[in-house]
Image (cartoon, helix red, strand yellow):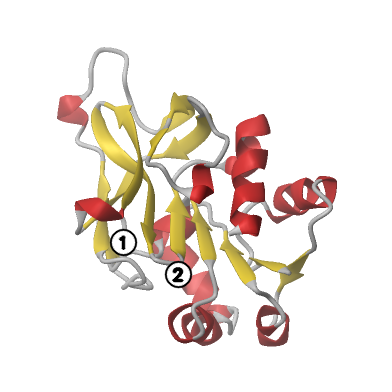
Amino acid sequence: MIALVDYGLGNIQAFMHIYKRLNLPCIRATTVEELHAADKIILPGVGAFDWAMQRLQASGMRETLDYLVLEKNVPVLGVCVGMQMMAQRSQEGEMDGLGWIPGEVKRFDEALFKAKTHLPHMGWNDVRPEDHPLFKDLTCPQFYFLHSYYFSPNAQQQMLARTDYGERFASAVYNQHIFGVQFHPEKSHHWGVQLLKNFAEL
């Protein structure tokens, strides 16, 4: 069972629609009890870093997520701001992140941008993944992005995929059973469907 963490932010219905089409069980988790029923977790997110952290804390699910991910080793996939929340901190806000993957969320350096390149990074872009089951059967994938900040992991080996936008950044990161993607698989057509299927099969 895949639990989609519903703390008021993220495209929950889009994820549920994809998993229904794939005939894979998933639930919208709004309580601690629903989280405990899951063997995999998706943490979506949109908007500003501090606002997302505040909403997650107010949901009452923060401590249970820490326990399931860090103590029980339940696989988790963070999406967009959900990925950024896994860092230790963000230049966008003042609150601490979850700290599940050592690193910092940084704003793009606009001085490095080429002509006509601007923020936010919005639209389709190539993603160059490492050889990993999360990207199984994905050849030259393209995904949909919408962000002005990116995850900078402390260790290069935690970069699972790279994308170029003014500079090369980590468009996917991981730490054992903890995964994060900066793009939106739920908006990325067959590439996104395949990635969400792969996550369910990890």
Which label's residue is closer to the chain start, 2 or 1? Answer: 2
Q: Is residue 40 left or right of residue 70?
A: right
SS at badge 1: loop
The residue carrying pointer 2 sits among few (fewer than 14), some (14 to 19) or many (20 or more) residues within 10 Å by Cα, namely many
What's the residue type where badge 2 is placed?
Answer: Met
**Closer-to-camera residue (20/123):** 20
**Closer-to-camera residue (67/90):** 67
Q: Residue at x 53, y 73 (%)?
A: 56
SS at badge 2: helix
Residue 59 in the image: state x and y as whole percent.
Answer: 60, 79
Please name the residue that numbered disc 1 is placed on: 93
Q: Which part of the image, by quadrant, shows the C terminus?
A: bottom right
Quarter of the view holding residue 101: bottom left
Residue 105 in the image: state x and y as whole percent.
Answer: 29, 54
What's the residue type where badge 1 is placed?
Answer: Gly
Q: Which mark is residue 43?
A: none
**Closer-to-camera residue (137/189):** 137
Q: Residue at x 80, y 63 (%)?
A: 25
**Contact (CB < 8 A) between labels 2 and 1?**
yes
Residue 62 in the image: state x and y as whole percent.
Answer: 51, 81
Q: Residue at x 67, y 48 (%)?
A: 197
Please name the residue that numbered disc 2 is placed on: 53
